[in-house]
Image (tube, helix red, strand yellow):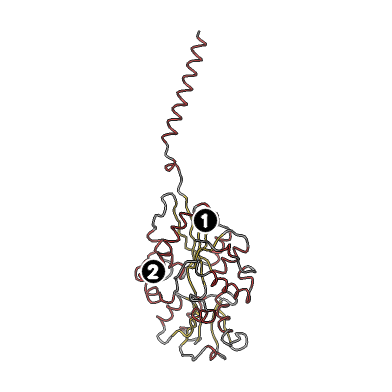
Amino acid sequence: MKKLLVCLLAILLALSVACTRDENMEAVDINDTEETLMLRFCFPGGVPSLTVAKLMKENPVIDENIAIEYEFQSTPDLLASKVLKGEADIAIVPSNLAAQLYNKDIPYKLAGTSVWGTLYLVGIEDIDNIESLKGSEITSFGKNLTPDLVFKYVLSQNGIDVDKDISVNYLSAASEVGPQFIGGKTNLAVLSEPQTTNILMKKEDAKILLDFNEEWSKITGNEYGYPQASLIIKADLIDNYRDFLDKFLNLYEENLKWIMENPQLAGQYMEELELGMNKDIVVNGIGRMNIYPFRIDDSIEYYQKYYEVLLNFAPDVIGGQIPDEEFYLER
């Protein structure tokens, strides 16, 4: 009899525990147990950082369960390291690096253009045409890097052999060119934004002699010029969180339009976030920073032409071949 009672008590206790567990499970809301997914958005300085400033400052909520951590990368090497290791979920990178990643089977897709060409030839005297640069000495930067290849392509298409017809004094960094020009050590300098605006504000007799993005458009027929920097996204993120990414991309595109219409506030955000560009430069240079349009749908052929030019000059800068259409994110 005692054994029977013990068995009955054990059964009742087990049933009680099971019921309690079931009640607790039914009471749990799965949304309460999901951890927030943190995405890492890496971007470099210069004009690309301007395209992110509003998002970084206001940090809008796109999805309650997904957050974005904005990471400013102070050097190109740090940025490249993040994407090569796959540590960035979203990133703004030079468009040639985006092609390299794809050609190395590092799973990112190109979602749109953050910055079109911002390369300029600045001088203190007018030139009649590009061909009249023959015999000149020009200070530039980054020999055989993509800005230099754009420079060489535009001049070559206008009858100038860079190796024979002009003398180019290459400095190791873009930041070194401006001081040389301001100090009077050169009268012709190749500069990119925001350095171009900074020089124009500091040296009264400085003027833009060539807009390489505009010249590229004349040569190729590409309305927007050449795609200098691009937004890339991890492929698995696209596969698993497509609804979120569509909302994010729409927001990013709207943000670019907002910057064009609100350079004062955009410049203020840049100063407050210490992203390396003050408000005056944003306000004075916004028309030369070429941050719109964004959508990739209308510009795949522009990328293909850009990559074709780079491939002909230096195949390694894009990874040896022009990416196929799988490289681009369909929207």
Position in image of residue 326 (x %, y %): 58, 62
Q: Residues within 10 Å of mark 1 (few under 14, many from 20)?
A: some
Position of 15 with respect to 171 (left or right) is: left
Image quadrant in which you'd find residue 310: bottom right
Q: Vertical placement of 258 versus 18: above or below? A: below
**What's the residue at 46%, 90% (across, down)?**
126
Secondary structure of the residue carrying tag 2 is helix
For residue 253, which quarter of the picture?
bottom left
Is residue 110 or residue 302 the one in the foreground? 302
Residue pointed to by mark 2: 259
Compared to residue 10, the image places residue 312 above or below, namely below
Label 1 with label 2: CB-CB less than 8 Å: no
Per the image, label 1 sits on a secondary structure element best described as: helix
Residue at the far top in the pictured view? 1
Residue type highlighted by circle 2: Ile
Q: How many marks?
A: 2
Crowding near the residue tagged with mark 2, few <14, some 14–19, many ≥20 C-alpha atoms within 10 Å? many
Taking the spot 45% from the left edge, 51% from the top edge, the residue there is: 66
The residue positioned 58% from the left and 66% from the top of the image is 99
Task: Give the labeled residue for mark 1.
Answer: 238
The amino acid pointed to by label 1 is: Ile
Which of these two is toward me, 152 or 173? Answer: 152
> Which of the labelled discs sits on residue 93, or is there none?
none
Looking at the picture, tell me which residue is in the foreground, 103 or 148.
103
Image spot of residue 70 (x, y percent) = 45, 59
